[in-house]
Amino acid sequence: MAAVIPAGALIASVVVLATKAGPAVRVNGAHFLTGSDWKLGNTYGAIQHTDGVAHPLGSSYGAWPLIAGTLQSSAIALIIAVPISLGAAFALTERLPRWLSSILRFGIELLAGVPSVLIGLWGALTLGPLLARDVYPIVADHMPNVPVLSYFKNPVGHGEGLLTSGIVLALMIVPIIASTARNLFAQVPALPKEGGEALGLTDWEVTRKITLPWVRSGLIGATVLGLGRALGETIAIAMVSGALLNTITPNVYGTMGTVAAAIVSQLDSAFTDGTGFAIASLAELALVLSIVSLLVNMLARFIVHRTDSLSAPVGVGF
Amino acid sequence: MTESSNNGVGPNVPLDRRDPATGQAPGPVDPALEAIDPDRGRPANVIATRGLSLRFGDKTILSGIDMLFPRGTITALIGPTGSGKSTFLRTLNRMNDKVSGFRYGGDVLLDDESIWASHQDLLALRRRVGMLFQRPNPFPMSIRDNVVAGVKAHRIAKGKQLDVVAEERLRQVGLWDAAKDRLGDSPFRLSGGQQQLLCLARALAVGPEVLLLDEPTSSLDPISTENVEAMLKSLAPALTLIVVTHNLGQARRVSHHTMFFYDGALVEHGPTEVLFEHPREDQTERYVTGRMG
Ligand SMILES: Nc1ncnc2c1ncn2[C@@H]1O[C@H](COP(=O)(O)OP(=O)(O)OP(=O)(O)O)[C@@H](O)[C@H]1O
Ligand SMILES: [Mg+2]
C-alpha cells in the first residue's frame, strides 16, 4: 500500500508535465533532443503559429547540451563517489574501531543533511576557485595529449564548470551511497568471509569476491539512488556549473549547464513569454529529466536481474 | 617432479608437495620413493602444540595443552559446549589472530616450525591448513568458481586447468554427477549436504596438508552425514584431519585419536578405542557414556 503513494505521485506528476509540455513537444519535435540552441525568441515582438501553437518569432529549443551536461556531470559524480563510498563503508564496517566508526557515521549523516544551497554556495565561492587555482592546473599539466585524457588539458577556467559540478555532486551523493553500502556490508554474514580467509584469500580478495558480490544488487540500488540525486540536483549545480544553455564544454573544466539547473535558472525569463511556449518548453525539459531518471532506474533493475542469479538468496542466514 | 606425481590425480592423493612458500619442490625427488611414501623425511607429527594456552581478554579458555597430531591421522575433538574446542581448532590456522582480545601462550608447531614465526606467511599457512565450517559457506559465485576460488587466489592453476581442477575435486567429493550440468549455477540451490561437499572440494582444491573441521555435519541430515564421514575417512592418510564433533558415534567411527576437553582443560586424549572403552578419567567416562550434560 505504501508503495502505491509514491508511484501514484510519480505518475500524476508525469501526466501533469506531459500535459503542460504537449504544445512544446509537438512544435520542437526531435530538435529538442538533438538541437543545441535555447532561444526564447523576441518575446515582445511578432507571434508565430506552428501546428496551431503560438510562440514568439525566432524561438527555438534544443536541449542537447543540457542533456549531455546532465549525463556528464552525473557520470563524473559517480566515478568519484562510488569508490569513495565503498571504501568508506568498508572502513566503517571492517577496519575502524567501533567508537571511531560511529563518530564517522554521524558525520556522514550530518553531511547528507546539509542543504544543497549551502554546498552550492561553498562550491562556488571556495571549492571551485581553490580547485582552479591549486589542483586543476597540476592535473592539466600532467595529462598526456592522447584521446580521452586530452579532455583534461587546459584551459582550466576559474572553477565554475563540469568537473567542479561533478565534484560537488559527488560530495552530495557520497553520504547516500556510503551509508546504504555500510548497512549492506554489515549484513554480510561472517561465515562466508571466514571461509575465504581460511582458504588463504587476502582481505582484498575476500572483499572483492565475497563481500561485494554478496550485496551486489543492493549496491547497484544504492548507486542508482545516488545517481537519481545527481541527475536531479538543481540549485548547487546552477551555482557551480556556469549555468549555460547552449554549450557542451570542450574540456572537463569548462562551464556548462544541466537540465535541472536550466529549469530553475530559466523560469523567470520563461514567464516573460506571453504565449506560454517558453514555459511549455521548460515543462518538456522536466519531462526529459523524468524519463532519463526512469531509464536509469530500469537499466539498474535490468543489471540487478542479470547479476542476481549468483548472489545469495535473500534471507539466507549464516 | 612431474605434475601427476605431485598434484594428486588419484582421489586419495590430494597433496601438492611443493613448498607453498617458495613453490619449489622439497629437494630432489625420486618418483618411485615418492609414490611409496610422500611423507619421507618429514616430521612424524604434522602439528604439535607446546604448552598452548588460549585467552579471550582476561578469560582463559584453555591452558597448557601439549598435543601431537601424527601425520595422516584423524583426531576427534569432543567435549561439552563451551569447552574450547572451536577456539583450539581455530587457533591452528590462526583464524583467532584477528579476534579482539585473543591472546595465546606456548606455541603451535607445523612441521616443527611455529605457525606464528615471523617468516610464516599467513596465506601460505592457510593453504597448508584448510578449514571446513559448521555450516556450509559457499561463496556468491558459480559452483565451478567456488571449487577453484582458492586455486586461483594461490595461483596454483589458471585458464583451462581450472576446469580440470574443478572436475577432479568435484569427483573426489562425489559431487560431480550432481553438479556437472550446473557448474555455472548458483551454489545456493544445492542441498545443504551438497553445499558442504562443495566447500570440502574447495578446501581440498588448494592441496592442504591438514584439514580442520568444526562440526562439519551438524547441519546435515543422516544420509549426508554418512556421505561426509565416508569422505573424511578416505582423505586420511593423505591428509591429517582434526574434527570437532558433538556426535560421539561419529568420533568413534572416523577418528584414530580423540581429545576430550572439559572445563578449560584437555582432560584426556588417546587412541579413540581406548578413550571410549577404557577412559582413565572419571569425567571422560561420564561424558562418553552420556551421563554428563
Ligand atoms: N570471540 C570471543 N570472545 C570472547 N570469548 C569467546 C570468544 N569466542 C569464544 N569465546 C568463549 O570461549 C569459550 C569456548 O568457546 P568455544 O566456541 O571454543 O567452545 P566450543 O567447545 O567450540 O563449544 P561448542 O561445542 O558450543 O561449539 C566459551 O566460553 C566462549 O564463550
Ligand atoms: Mg564450537
Image (cartoon, rainbow, N blue to C red):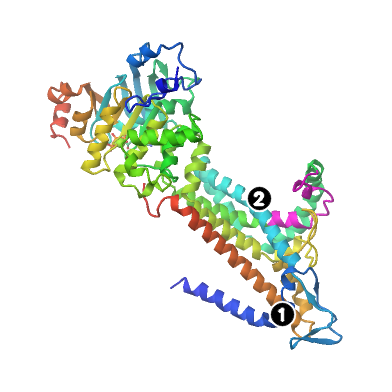
Q: Which residue is mark 1?
A: A24
Q: Nearer the viewer, residue B225 or B113?
A: B225
Residue B126, percent from left and from top: 43, 28
In the rendered image, residue B208, in percent from the top left (x then y), is placed at 39, 26
The subunit letter for the residue under badge 1 reads A
- Which quarter of the rendered image does ligand 2 occupy? top left
Task: Kindly report which numbered mark, 1 or 2, lies closer to the viewer in this rendering.
Answer: 1
Give the alpha-carbon distance from disc 1 to disc 2, as whole Å.
36 Å
Mark 1 is on which residue type? Ala
Tell me if residue A253 can be seen.
yes
Is A274 placed above or below A239 here? below
* Of residues B65 and A156, the one drawn nearer to the viewer in this rendering: A156
Q: Please state if B186 lies on the left or on the right of A261 as rendered.
A: left
B194 relative to B98, above or below: below
Q: Secondary structure at mark 2?
A: helix
Q: Can residue B58 be seen from the camera position used here? A: no
Q: Which residue is mark 2?
A: A80
- A15 sits to left or right of A138: left
Residue B150 in which image quadrant: top left
Task: Name which residue type carries label 2.
Answer: Ile
Q: Which residues are magenta?
A: A145-168
Q: Is residue A11 left or right of residue A22?
A: left
Q: Chain of mark 2?
A: A
Residue shown at 77%/65% (left/top)?
A243
Q: Position of residue B214 (x, y in %)?
A: 31, 34
- The quadrant holding residue B128 is top left
Name the residue: 87% across, 85% down: A45
Q: Is residue A1 above or below residue A317?
A: below
